[in-house]
Image (cartoon, rainbow, N blue to C red):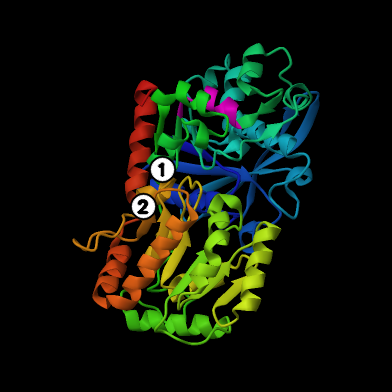
Amino acid sequence: MNILFAVSEAFPLAKTGGLGDVGGSLPAALKEQNIDVRVIMPRYSSIPVYLQEQIEYVATFKVELSWRKIQCNLCRLHYNDVYYYLIENENFFNREKLYDYWDDAERFAFFSKAVLESLTKLGDFQPDIIHCNDWHTALIPLIMKENYGNNPFYFDIKTLFTIHNLKHQGVFPAEVFEDVLGLGGHVSAWEKLEFHGGINYMKAALLSADYITTVSQTYADEIIHPYFGEQLDGVLRARIDNLCGILNGLDTQKYNPQDDPNLVVNYRSSLCKKEENKKHLQELLSLPVRTDLPIIAMISRLVDQKGLDLVAHVLEEILSMDLQLVVLGTGDKKYEEMFEHFAAKYPHKVAIQLVFNEALAHKIYAGSDILLMPSQFEPCGLAQMIAMRYGAIPIVRETGGLKDSVDPYNEYTGEGNGFTFANYNAHELLFTIQRAVRFFYDDKVAWKGLAENARKSDFSWAKSAKKYGELYQSLTQAGEY
């Protein structure tokens, strides 16, 4: 099978979040399943220089956006046994950030059309499936049906669309339909794109792709209901027979405490060596060096989705316990100011870093005892998987991928790899934190066993890549899964 993996970011070329991690690690895992997977993404100016120097040109062509014909270069990079095809246009992709520009509708319409135009220019590689990811690539299934439906080259190509976060859909004004997409007169396309008087790129993919996946089975079950469905639950219910969840995996080479270069002491299961990283973290963040108390970490965007409103309600009670709190991330001003206030009030207990620093994140995973993720919703989540690999115990709400990856600790059987709570309730969160802290102090044997369970949890891409392989095989053979 030949799979063209269309994505807006892939580590190490470009990354703003979990999508970049998936774009970088899933194709490599699929290669190990003997699937020829090649990634196609924009050529951003922010791609590291050492990779830019290895990029070669493949072809030059024009991309039509309504009445405009725009120059496009197709480039190629071979890195870590994966081929990356790069769509180059300086006007659209030579920018400081990847997203959040006034012309994002045009930028990613251009990218989607360029992906389809490039298919005839890939030499001996002809995809059986285009695997599209999130709203940035959501136009590909629609445009292929609308504009290439009579072209025999495209007849047998299937499309798979993966929802990484349903909250971000690519919603734009109605004039984009004709002025950018050039689909005036395409009644079926308008019906698939129309959304409360505007247009919605993701909706078009949900109605046009041959199959839909999302990044955990629980999230797939959740998004067909209004609370999680972000106004697309009805569309998803209509496609329920062509929808499933496949849990994301983890790049186990990148996140490996045995050889992580960011750690002061590498380790596998040694609590003593983990304590050395804890001491280093406390020194680095100007906290009292005490290995006898637990460090609770939050490595997150500081937004409502991540459960910060729950934390705000009970933060004073949390800090009344004998513990330290470390926070890394940026987000809404109200939460940044909240943590700044508590860091000033409790300098011996709270350390905050209002940035995102990859190296520091690794140090925090290695130096903390508990990771807090009380999310309102969480399609998959990677932080809880990373934390467990480093021997930190997650406290999570039972939603999305958190529910699928964290098994609640059972003190009677010793089973489980974390602590969970079900309802989106601040005091339920508080009680769960209190329970975890009590085990940390009162039952060292149980805590050691819990940490071992967490470390042994298998979040490699192998199982998920196998499921994708089976899905690809089904799509190419029968058209349905």
Is 480 drawn above or below residue 257 in the view shown?
above
The spot of residue 336 in percent (x, y) is 66, 64
Q: Which residues are magenta?
A: 202-211
Indicate the quadrant containing the N terminus: top left, top right, bottom left or bottom right: top left
Question: In 3D space, how far apart are the residues under numbered discs 2 and 1 (Cα atoms)?
Answer: 9 Å
Residue found 75% across the figure and 43% down from its top:
92
Q: Is residue 480 magenta?
A: no
What numbered label is drawn on residue 216?
1
Q: Is residue 481 left or right of residue 112?
A: left
Is 444 drawn above or below residue 395 in the view shown?
below
Please say if the residues under marks 2 and 1 sit with CB atoms less than 8 Å apart. Answer: yes
Q: At label 1, which amino acid type do we have?
A: Ser
Q: Would you name the residue on which mark 2 appears?
A: 405
Quadrant of residue 479 within the rendered picture: top left
Q: Is residue 244 left or right of residue 12?
A: left
Quadrant of residue 456 within the rendered picture: bottom left
Q: Secondary structure at mark 2?
A: helix
Closer-to-camera residue (42/79): 42
Closer-to-camera residue (314/288): 314
Q: Secondary structure at mark 1?
A: loop
- Most prominent secondary structure in the magenta stretch? helix
Q: At label 2, which amino acid type do we have?
A: Ser
* Outermost residue to the left: 413
> Is residue 254 at least partly visible in the picture?
no
Residue found 58% across the figure and 40% down from its top:
167
Indicate the quadrant containing the C terminus: top left, top right, bottom left or bottom right: top left
The spot of residue 71 in percent (x, y) is 76, 36
